[in-house]
Image: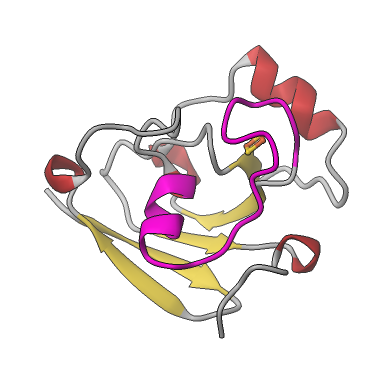
C-alpha cells in the first residue's frame, strides 16, 4: 500500500510505494531521507545516514505514529540538534511503516540544498 509524504515548506508531496523503494542504499534504509533525496528534495545528511550527526533533523507534523520509535543512537543525536521539538526525528533513521500519510517540515537551517 502506498502512502504520501508532504515536505514543508516546499509543499511538495511524494507518493511512496514501499515495494518500489528498491534496496536501501548508502545505509539509508528506505527511510525519509532516501525518499526525499530520490524526489530531489534536499535534506542535509552530513554523516551519510548513520545517525552520527543531526543535520538530517526533520519535524514530523503529522503521521508520526507510523514511524517506529527512535533508537538510543537517534535520541542521542537529536539531543544535540538545534530547534529540537517533540516531533523531531532524524530523516535517515525514520522509516515509516506506510500506514499513514505524513507531513514533514524541514527546518530552515537544513534547507540549504533544497531546490526550489
Ligand atoms: S544523516 Fe547524519 S544523522 Fe541522519
The image position of residue 76, as x and y in percent, is: 78, 21
Above or below, 103 relative to 80 = below
The residue stretch that appears in magenta = 33-54
The verdict on residue 52 being magenta is yes
Q: Residue at x 44, y 58 (%)?
A: 36
Q: Quadrant of residue 22?
A: top left
Figure check: 110 above or below 13: above
Q: Looking at this view, is 114 or 94 the one in front?
A: 114
From the top left corner, tell me how far across and down residue 34 is, in percent. Answer: 42, 47
Residue located at (38% from left, 30% from top)? 29
Q: Quadrant of the C terminus?
A: bottom right
Q: What is the chief secondary structure element of the magenta stretch?
A: loop
What x and y, as percent, mark residue 9? 60, 78
Tell me if 52 is positioned left or right of 115 in this view: right
Q: Is residue 79 left or right of residue 69?
A: right
89 is higher (above) or lower (below) than 5: above
Q: Is residue 84 left or right of residue 101?
A: right
Q: Is residue 48 magenta?
A: yes
Amino acid at each position: 500500500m502506498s502512502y504520501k509524504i508532504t515536505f514543508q515548506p516546499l509543499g511538495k508531496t511524494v507518493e511512496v510505494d514501499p515495494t518500489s523503494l528498491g534496496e536501501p542504499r548508502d545505509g539509508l534504509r528506505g527511510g525519509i531521507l532516501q525518499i526525499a533525496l530520490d524526489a530531489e528534495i534536499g535534506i542535509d545528511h552530513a554523516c551519510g545516514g548513520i545517525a552520527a550527526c543531526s543535520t538530517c533533523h526533520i519535524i514530523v507534523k503529522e503521521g508520526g505514529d507510523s514511524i517506529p520509535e527512535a533508537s538510543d543512537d537517534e535520541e542521542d543525536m537529536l539531543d544535540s540538534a538545534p530547534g529540537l521539538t517533540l516531533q523531531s526525528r532524524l530523516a535517515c533513521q525514520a522509516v515509516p511503516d506506510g500506514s499513514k500519510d505524513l507531513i514533514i517540515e524541514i527546518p530552515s537551517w537544513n534547507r540549504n540544498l533544497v531546490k526550489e
